[in-house]
Amino acid sequence: MVDPLSRPDFVVGTLPNGLRWIHQQVASPAGHVGLILQAGSRDEGPDEEGLAHFIEHLLFKGTTRRKAYHILSRIEDVGGELNAYTGKEDTTLYASFLVSHYGRSMELLFDIIQNARFPEKEIPKEKDVILDEIDSYRDSPSELIFDEFDALVYGDHPLGRNILGTEESVPTFTRAQVLRFVERNYRPENAVLTSVGGISAKAFERMALRYAAPWEAKGQPTERLAAPTISPKIEHRHMDIHQCHMVMGGPALHVHDDDLSALVLMNNVLGGPSMNSRLNLNIRERHGIAYQIESFLNPYSDTGLWGIYAGTDKETMERCHRLVLRELKDLREKRLGTLQYSKAKTQLLGQMALAQESNGSLMAALGKSLLTFNRVDTFEEMAAKVEAVTPSQMLEVANRLYDPAQLCELRYLPTA
């Protein structure tokens, strides 16, 4: 059934089993299809840390119709790509391929999601693979610190758990746990099928009806544990490393907050991906004391987290910290001037436009938007939200969130 949300550039619908779908037809020889499930590490129980990610790995280990080799070869034999990833609040399974292989790819995705066997013999092997993955993160403090900052901020709440799990939790997983998590969270009414490629919406809907129809609705999953209140915490850890690493930040806005566009724009000004962000210009370029410095923003369904990462030498750590606080103070006390404000909006809109040039990224963005908001904004509508942001709104948000009294901070410091 086609939904009234549909527009000339994309079509939205819902299957009889409750699975929502969205397809955008483009003139391209490649197609991209994804299944996004509202089931991530946040949906794990107290004894399940890392289970959502563990299941993502096991999905490729065989179905009632295919062995692992046949799953991997089904797409790769025709030059395509099959992959998956797990987030805090969702899991995505996707394929990219020549348009002529749309049916082959969709059939495989739904075979995996409906008929995965999670073979007992594969469970010990995949535990070892994930434990190796955890070890690789331990060898990269600039990546590990982000996960451990989440743990510092959110504590024992599921949002504070490492998506990969831990050396203690992963070895305890059983097939029975896997099946219970899948039964609880993998359901069509809790998922979105998303697609960008060179076929019509009618052809796509026919395929979706054919391959997704056997996936039975089960009702909404268990309600998530409400996000905790974030309180200031500071922790310094000494490690066998040469460079210092620091993440500092605090509570941010959730995805439904009316001021989120203002925060996104401000985060871009502060330490976004461009080399002319304030943090990069003033701390790396002017003072030369941080090879890598950036700000980040993680909005969730009912909470959010913003932060700044910097890697610097032991001798310049305190100076870097003071300079970061100065940038935050400037954003709290000084409204953006007309020229700064105009440049900031133009830059963000350009980045948004370039992001939509990748059809694979567009496929994921369309599906995530439909899953989260039950709507999809056109580029013009997203741009209008950015254009509506005012310097006064940005100043108010900065004062609400960049208060030094509510900052959390985690540092990795060399032992010597």
Image (cartoon, rainbow, N blue to C red):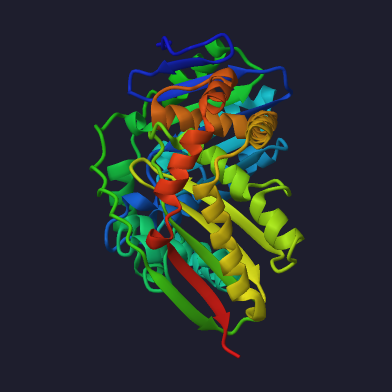
- Answer left or right for 92 relative to 231: right
The mark tally for this picture is: 0
Quadrant of the image occupied by residue 406: bottom left
Name the residue rendered at 31%, 29% in the picture: 216
Name the residue rendered at 30%, 59% in the picture: 157
Q: Position of residue 167 (x, y in %)?
A: 43, 73
Q: Residue furthest bottom?
A: 416
- Answer left or right for 174 relative to 122: left
Quadrant of the image occupied by residue 255: top left
Q: Position of residue 336 (x, y in %)?
A: 59, 39
Determine if residue 134 is in view: yes
Q: Quadrant of the N terminus?
A: top left
Q: Nearer the viewer, residue 313 or 369?
A: 313
Q: Quadrant of the C terminus?
A: bottom right
Give above or below for 330 relative to 372: below
Name the residue rendered at 41%, 31% in the picture: 371
Q: Position of residue 229 (x, y in %)?
A: 28, 55
Give above or below for 405 relative to 89: below
